[in-house]
Image (cartoon, grey):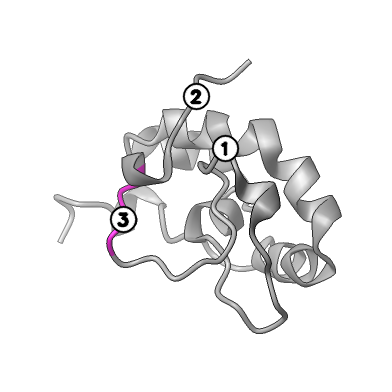
Amino acid sequence: MAKTSYPRSCPKFDTCNASVCPLDAKWQKRKHISGDKCCLYLLEAAKLDAKANFAGAGLANVYEAIEAVKHDILSSSASIKRTYTRAASTASRLHPKFTKGDN
């Protein structure tokens, strides 16, 4: 089981506009309306080698937290699921060449 996380522990917390946060223990109480932003990290979890990409970016704990609720979130919203499925075919933004220190 993944360690409990909180939205404020997310590196994107201050700039995120996602209505459903996988790090929010009460995410089920949030409404996602088609067209709302999706969590960057939830979408990154769809990518090939996601676990390694998160680990390489120092975000293994975020990956574990997302994996614990991902199925439930995707089952709760067709819009999030569609966006997640599309994200699987795009390049990772967490890939080591995009992380801090590799400018």
- Disc 2, disc 1: CB below 8 Å? yes
Helix, strand or loop under label 3: helix
Tell me the CA gap for discs 3 and 1. 32 Å
Q: Which residue is mark 1?
A: 25
Residue range corresponding to the magenta coloring: 10-14
Q: Which residue is mark 2?
A: 4
Dot placed on the residue nearer the N-terminal end, 2 or 1: 2
Helix, strand or loop under label 1: loop
Residue at left offset 70%, top offset 77%: 33
Frontmost of labels 2 and 1 is 1
Dot placed on the residue nearer the N-terminal end, 3 or 1: 1
Frontmost of labels 3 and 1 is 1
Tell me the CA gap for discs 3 and 2. 29 Å
Q: Sort mark 1 into few (<14), some (14-19) or many (20+) by Cα contacts within 10 Å.
A: few
Residue 58's spot in the image, x, y percent?
Answer: 32, 34
Q: Quadrant of residue 13?
A: bottom left
Amino acid type, mark 2: Thr
In this rendered view, identify the residue nearer to me: 35 or 61.
Answer: 35
Residue 96's spot in the image, x, y percent?
Answer: 34, 48
Q: In the drawing, does residue 27 fall left or right of residue 16?
A: right
Q: Quadrant of residue 36?
A: bottom right
Residue reaching furthest to the bottom = 35
Dot placed on the residue nearer the N-terminal end, 3 or 2: 2
Amino acid type, mark 3: Lys
Tell me the CA gap for discs 2 and 1. 8 Å
Amino acid type, mark 1: Ala
**Does residue 59 lie above or below 98 as drawn?**
above
- Disc 3, disc 2: CB below 8 Å? no
Q: Sort mark 2 into few (<14), some (14-19) or many (20+) by Cα contacts within 10 Å.
A: few
Tell me, for residue 97, which label it has, or none.
3
Residue reaching furthest to the top = 1
Q: In the drawing, does residue 72 fall left or right of residue 3?
A: right
